Image: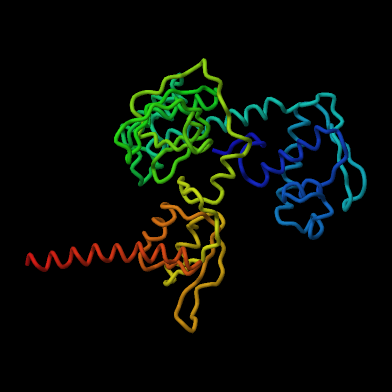
């Protein structure tokens, strides 16, 4: 069924409608070129590569203008858009007395968007942790629809990852306490420690990697200061809220910068981001790495082709070395090779040599049993 709301959707026509309406409500003169420039994310109409009439989707711009003009006329009872100039430099301006005549239609668009989001959540109940959905929809009848779809196996969005780790039910609590700036008392037992530790913790950031959720923040009297990492499945019991302890927030944009040069979540003290060159030794691995980048900094250094020393294509990434990066590359087997820098290459070579030693030892043991 076609949606009658001209503001709704991601089509270029709907985007034009929203841009044109915004210009009209300013009650200032504007042109079709101004609208097209904003649609193309250009600074001004002067930055258009050619005449607006020759731009892609110009026809949709005209349709958007006409539909918006009709909607305004129907609402106001009269034509409230004046124009001046010739066809090439025609300008428009809103002259109506109502500062926002299509407000209800735009509100309806927002409600429609929320309804679509609810539908998305229902369809993806096998993808998001159940605790998230039950937290956000706990007072909403849509929760019943979500549970019904999940029970009947009707979700159309699912994940291949194992997302049934311990303490997923803590996610809403942790999320809420970050938003409310509430300090927590957390009993935490890292897998490498024999005893659990009692932390006075200032929760600041939640991050998921490979199906596991991590809580970052400040743990009093612990290091590092701002990036103490808690794997939530290692939390013992339910955290308590400490209202008498003053919350300390991380500096602005701290976690955005902290994760910028990392694959995953871990940081090895002293490690800094470096340029790493990675070689793909088959066309399939090259295309896989190209379409599923190892890191957002990834760049193509050379296309996959025949070289004097073999067939390959090279990529570069600018990252810190950590276990997640090593695992991400090694899982591709002999399809990917770390070419440089030499110290990073040696770390991978040592890992591979140790793996070979384990498998060679296992092969000899099997031979002895046969």
Residue 302 placed where, x, y %?
55, 72
- Vertical placement of 39 versus 241: above or below? below
Front position in the image: 195 or 253:
195
Q: How is the image coloured?
A: rainbow
Toward the front, the furthest residue is 221
Front position in the image: 272 or 87:
272
Q: Residue at x 87, y 31 (%)?
A: 95
Residue 259 placed where, x, y %?
54, 46
Q: Residue at x 33, y 28 (%)?
A: 236
Front position in the image: 135 or 157:
135
Toward the bottom, the furthest residue is 308
Residue 177 placed where, x, y %?
50, 24
Q: Quadrant of residue 332?
A: bottom left
Residue 270 placed where, x, y %?
51, 51
Toward the right, the furthest residue is 85
Is residue 57 rendered to the left or right of residue 176? right
């Amino acid at each position: 069924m076609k949606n009658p709301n001209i503001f709704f959707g991601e089509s270029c026509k709907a985007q034009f409608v929203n841009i044109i309406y915004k210009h009209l409500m300013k009650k200032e003169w504007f042109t079709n070129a101004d609208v097209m420039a904003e649609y193309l994310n250009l600074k001004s109409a002067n930055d258009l590569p050619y005449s607006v009439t020759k731009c892609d989707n110009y026809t949709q711009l005209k349709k958007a203008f006409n539909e918006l003009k009709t909607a305004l006329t129907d609402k106001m009872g009269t034509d409230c858009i004046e124009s001046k100039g010739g066809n090439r430099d025609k300008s428009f301006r809103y002259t109506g007395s109502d500062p926002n005549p299509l407000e209800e239609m735009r509100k309806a668009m927002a409600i429609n968007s929320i309804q679509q989001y609810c539908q998305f959540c229902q369809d993806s109940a096998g993808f998001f942790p159940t605790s998230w959905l039950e937290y956000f929809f706990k007072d909403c009848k849509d929760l019943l629809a979500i549970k019904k779809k999940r029970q009947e196996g009707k979700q159309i969005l699912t994940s291949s990852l194992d997302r049934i780790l311990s303490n997923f039910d803590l996610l809403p609590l942790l999320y809420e306490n970050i938003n409310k700036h509430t300090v927590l008392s957390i009993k935490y037992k890292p897998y490498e420690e024999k005893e659990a530790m009692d932390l006075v913790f200032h929760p600041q950031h939640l991050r998921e990697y490979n199906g596991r959720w991590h809580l970052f923040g400040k743990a009093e009297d612990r290091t590092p200061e701002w990036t103490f990492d808690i794997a939530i499945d290692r939390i013992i019991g339910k955290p308590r809220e400490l209202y008498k302890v003053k919350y300390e927030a991380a500096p602005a944009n701290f976690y955005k910068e902290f994760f910028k040069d990392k694959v995953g979540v871990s940081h090895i003290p002293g490690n800094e981001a470096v340029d790493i060159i990675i070689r793909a030794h088959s066309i399939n691995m090259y295309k896989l790495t190209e379409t599923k980048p190892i890191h957002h900094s990834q760049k193509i250094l050379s296309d996959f082709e025949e070289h004097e020393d073999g067939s390959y294509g090279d990529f570069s990434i600018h990252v810190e070395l950590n276990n997640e990066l090593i695992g991400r590359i090694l899982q591709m087997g002999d399809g990917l090779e770390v070419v440089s820098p030499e110290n990073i290459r040696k770390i991978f070579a040592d890992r591979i040599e140790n793996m070979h030693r384990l498998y060679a030892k296992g092969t000899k043991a099997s031979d002895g049993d046969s």
